[in-house]
Image: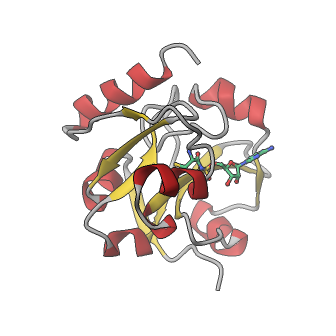
Amino acid sequence: MAGSIERVTQAAVAAGLEIEILRMGASTRTAEDAALQCGCSVAQIVKSLIFQGESSGKLYLFLVAGNNRLDIGKAASLAGEALKRADPRHIRDETGFAIGGVSPIGHLIVIPAFADETLLGFDQVWAAAGAHDAVFSAEPRALLAAARARAADLAAA
Ligand code: 5CA
């Protein structure tokens, strides 16, 4: 999507997060693909999952470690309402990112965000940068701050 990588750059600058966006020239659409390209563990890949409130229709962002599954019950508790998976087109319209390139930062609208606390156990994590082959690395606490994401227990057991 035109401009989506630039939007990530601008959001990082605005948040004081120094990043270098890398175009890998190969798919980083999934956590497994991204880990292979970045030469890191799947656990260090930040999945940016968008869910929608059943009653409000609001979107929520959950930053989940690549080796974890989001516990939908825990996610609903954090959001304060029942959640469903958001439709890909709705995600694209509201965030400005297509599935596979949804970044933790730089959305078109402000989206309440929560982050898997296991990400904090690493020196460095990798996240999508607005395209299906674009990634950046960051120190996890700095990334969560830039995404205004609250760390929480949100992984399925
Ligand atoms: N670039 C990689 C790693 S940084 C990435 O974006 N991974 S991801 O996990 O954040 O994005 C892929 C995720 O999109 C999948 O885990 C899945 O939860 C979600 N997804 C895939 N297909 C759909 C769909 N049809 N509707 C809604 N979400 C989907």
Q: Percent from the top left, x then y, of residue 52?
A: 72, 48
Q: For this rendering, which residue is in front, 71 or 56?
A: 71
| Image position of 142 (left or right of 106) | left
Mark count:
0
* Residue at 41% across, 51% down: 38
Q: For this rendering, which residue is in front, 21 or 96?
A: 21
* Residue at 55% across, 37% down: 26
Q: For this rendering, which residue is in front, 27 or 123?
A: 27
| Image position of 33 (left or right of 46) | right
Q: What quarter of the picture does the N terminus occupy?
A: top right
* Residue at 58% across, 51% down: 33
As drawn, which residue projects farthest toward the bottom?
Answer: 157
* Residue at 29% across, 61% down: 124
Q: What quarter of the picture does the C terminus occupy?
A: bottom right
Q: For this rendering, which residue is in front, 140 or 137?
A: 137
| Image position of 67 (left or right of 139) | right
Q: Percent from the top left, x then y, of residue 135?
A: 43, 40
Q: Percent from the top left, x then y, of residue 113?
A: 49, 52
